[in-house]
Amino acid sequence: QVQLVESGGGSVQAGGSLRLSCAPAQLIYSNYYMAWFRQTPGNEREGVATIFTGGVGNGHTYYSDSVKGRFTISRDNAENRLYLQMNNLKPEDSAIYSCATTAGHLMMAANEALSPHVYHYWGQGTQVTVSS
């Protein structure tokens, strides 16, 4: 069983920045994805960013079009943490953000890697609120 814990959410004005953190970021599997998803009431989870850990393709990332160029996913192996740096935040970025991991997976195409259906373990989520 993998327990993920997020931190770093909060309230910020439009144009501001936040950095989310998720621990742990290193698992027992040789190949896996870790990702950030977000969800607003009444809507499905949206894959925001994902990063691959493994042999070939290690560190490869995917981003949703809505955050590309503004958000950066990264992993700090020394601190065993996954991060999501969010810059130039917009009110439509307001949501509960959760980190998730697959249970071991080879590299996938973007649409699959950003789908919640391939992820097995989830954190509780952290609220991000962006005011205009």
Image (cartoon, rainbow, N blue to C red):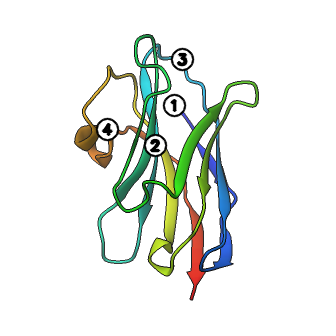
Name which residue type carries label 3.
Ile
Q: Quadrant of the C terminus?
A: bottom right
Please report whichever mark, 4 or 1, sits nearer to the chain's N-terminal start: 1
Q: Give the structural element (helix, strand or loop) at label 2.
A: strand
Q: Give the structural element (helix, strand or loop) at label 1.
A: loop
Please say if 102 is above or below 104: below
Q: Are marks 4 and 2 in contact (CB under 8 Å)?
A: yes
Which residue is pictured at 58% across the width and 77% down the height?
129
Which is in the foreground here, disc 4 or disc 1? 4
Please report whichever mark, 2 or 3, sits nearer to the chain's N-terminal start: 3
Q: Are marks 3 and 4 in contact (CB under 8 Å)?
A: no
Residue 112 marker: none
Name which residue type carries label 4.
Ala
| Label 4 environment density (alpha carbons within 10 Å; few <14, some 14–19, many ≥20) | many
In which image quadrant can residue 128 be found? bottom right
- Residue bearing the label numbered 3: 28
- Residue bearing the label numbered 4: 113
Which is in the foreground here, disc 1 or disc 2? 2
Which residue is pictured at 31% across the width and 38% down the height?
113
- Residue bearing the label numbered 2: 35
Please report whichever mark, 3 or 4, sits nearer to the chain's N-terminal start: 3
- Residue bearing the label numbered 1: 1
Please say if 45 is above or below 32: below
